[in-house]
Every structure is written in C-alpha cells, then in structure tokens.
Image: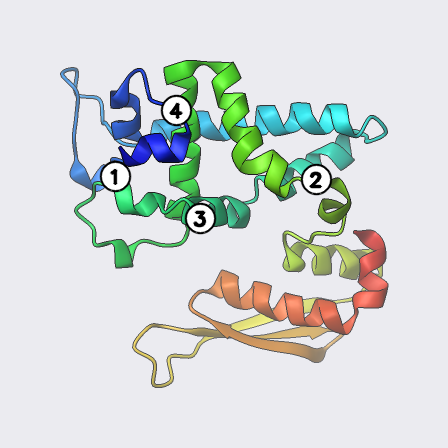
C-alpha cells in the first residue's frame, strides 16, 4: 500500500488516512452531518509539528530566547517548506477530489503533509508522530546554523529594515496580463520615492515577494545584519 511506504509503518486505522486525503470538494459527511475531509486533520497536524519542532529547538539551542526560538520554528514550518515536503512525498497523487489536480494551488501539498501528521497522531499517538517528524523534517532539514541565515519573507525583512532606518517605501501593484492566458500582476517597489525593484507574477503576493527579494540583494550588506 502506498501510504505504508510514505509512513514507514502500517496504519492501525486506515480511516484516519483516508480522511487525510479527502478534499472538501467530495462533500462527504458522517452520520451526524459532519464534514469528512482533511481540514481538521490539517489543523491537528500543524499543532503537532509546532510542538515537536519547538521541543527540539528548545533542547538544541539552550541560549535561544523566546523570540529567537519562535523565528527559528517559523522557518522550519513555513508554508513554503511544508509545500516542498508534500511535493517530495507526492501526496497529491493520493487525493480524492472532484477538482482536477492541475487546478490546485501550491498550498495543498503542505496542507496534506500536515493532515497526515494529524492522522499519525490519532492512529499511533505522540511518540510515533514525533518519530515521523524527526525522520521527515528534523533530521534532513533542521540545521541550526543554516536556519539562522534563512529568510522566510523578503517583504517582511525589507519592511522591517525600512522602518528601522526610517525610509519610506511603497509597492505599486497593477494587473499586467499581456499575452498570457493566466492573469499576472506587476509591481514596482520604491524606497524613498526611488524605484529599486520590479517584478511580475501570477498573484499580488508573489509579485511583491519577488520584488522584495530583488531589493534585498541590492541592499544585502545592510539588511543582512538584522537576520
């Protein structure tokens, strides 16, 4: 069974994992009218990931204060990283949905990863859940030194720097479809009324982050001191 290969063990109650791969578009309900899909398991898995990662960081970095530990945990469980984990395991191949796979956004990969973590907790308890997170997340990806230098949001970092240095900034975003079939947005990022970066993407958020990343590298020596 494919799920056994992903988990590394045989589930006691396969129903938890069937739910973990059921999309809300299936519109399935139990006898009491409660929706059956992965969203509640996603909530539970998110909490379990945060708990296990927080415990690991607490023990590994005794000198880290609350702010440091919170920031480091955020880097490990960032939406971008969880999406990568879900993609590596090809979780989307197991989803039951009435929506074609090509129409899902990137976040479904991370949502499914959280959902199977939640399912593992219900099926086997905390210890097995912790073991899975160590195997799939902590051992291969949690390198304290590398995490300290990892940027999870260039936009947040840039805004923080501008506010600290009392610089004015602005994101001028506008729709820019061009000849593309998919809607695109362009953005011009200005600092002290001077355009410092431009970018284009399929969403406003992505375009702003892309422009922020380009601006970051333009001011890297100054901004990197805050990381």
Q: Mark 4 sits on what residue?
A: 9
Answer above or below: position of 201 versus 157. below
Marks 1 and 3, how far apart in space?
Answer: 20 Å
Disc 3 crowd, CA 10 A, few/some/many (<14, 14-19, 20+): few
Q: Secondary structure at mark 1?
A: loop
Q: Which mark is residue 23?
A: 1
**Residue at far left of view:** 31
Q: Residues within 10 Å of mark 2 (few under 14, many from 20)?
A: few
Q: Earlier in the sequence, mark 2 or mark 4?
A: 4
Report which residue position mark 3 lands on: 88
| Camera-nearest label, 3 or 4 | 4
Tell me, yes or no, whether the two marked residues, 3 and 4, touch with CB atoms within 8 Å: no
Q: Is residue 140 left or right of residue 111?
A: right
Q: Which residue is mark 2?
A: 71
Instruction: Measure the alpha-carbon separation of dots 3 and 2.
Output: 24 Å
- Residue 22, by quadrant, is top left
**Does residue 203 lie above or below 64 as drawn?**
below
User: Is residue 208 shown left or right of residue 43?
Assistant: right
As measured in the structure, the alpha-carbon distance from the residue carrying label 2 to the one carrying label 4 is: 32 Å
Q: Residue at x 25, y 22 (%)?
A: 15
For the point 42% across and 29% down, the residue is 8
Nearer to us of marks 2 and 4 is: 4
Q: Secondary structure at mark 2?
A: helix
Question: What's the CA distance linking mark 3 and mark 4?
Answer: 18 Å
Coordinates of residue 103 in the picture (x, y in percent): 27, 57
User: What is the secondary structure assignment of the residue under circle 4?
Assistant: loop
Q: Earlier in the sequence, mark 3 or mark 2?
A: 2
């Amino acid at each position: 069974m494919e799920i056994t290969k992903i988990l590394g063990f045989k589930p006691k109650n396969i129903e938890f994992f069937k739910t973990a791969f059921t999309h809300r578009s299936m519109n399935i309900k139990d006898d009491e009218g409660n929706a059956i899909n992965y969203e509640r398991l996603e909530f539970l898995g998110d909490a379990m990931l945060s708990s296990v990662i927080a415990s690991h960081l607490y023990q590994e970095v005794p000198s880290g204060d609350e702010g440091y530990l919170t920031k480091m945990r955020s880097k490990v469980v960032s939406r971008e990283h969880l999406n990568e984990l879900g993609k590596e395991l090809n979780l989307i191949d197991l989803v039951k949905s009435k929506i074609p796979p090509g129409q899902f956004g990137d976040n479904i990969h991370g949502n499914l990863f959280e959902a199977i973590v939640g399912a593992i907790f219900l099926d086997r308890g905390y210890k097995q859940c912790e073991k899975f997170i160590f195997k799939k997340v902590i051992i291969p990806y949690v390198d304290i030194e590398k995490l300290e230098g990892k940027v999870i949001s260039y936009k947040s970092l840039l805004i923080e720097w501008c506010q600290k240095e009392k610089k004015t900034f602005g994101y001028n975003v506008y729709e820019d479809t061009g000849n593309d079939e998919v809607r695109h947005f362009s953005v011009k990022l200005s600092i002290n009324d001077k355009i410092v970066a431009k970018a284009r993407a399929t969403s406003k958020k992505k375009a702003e982050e892309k422009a922020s990343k380009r601006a970051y590298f333009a001011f890297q020596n100054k901004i990197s001191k805050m990381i």
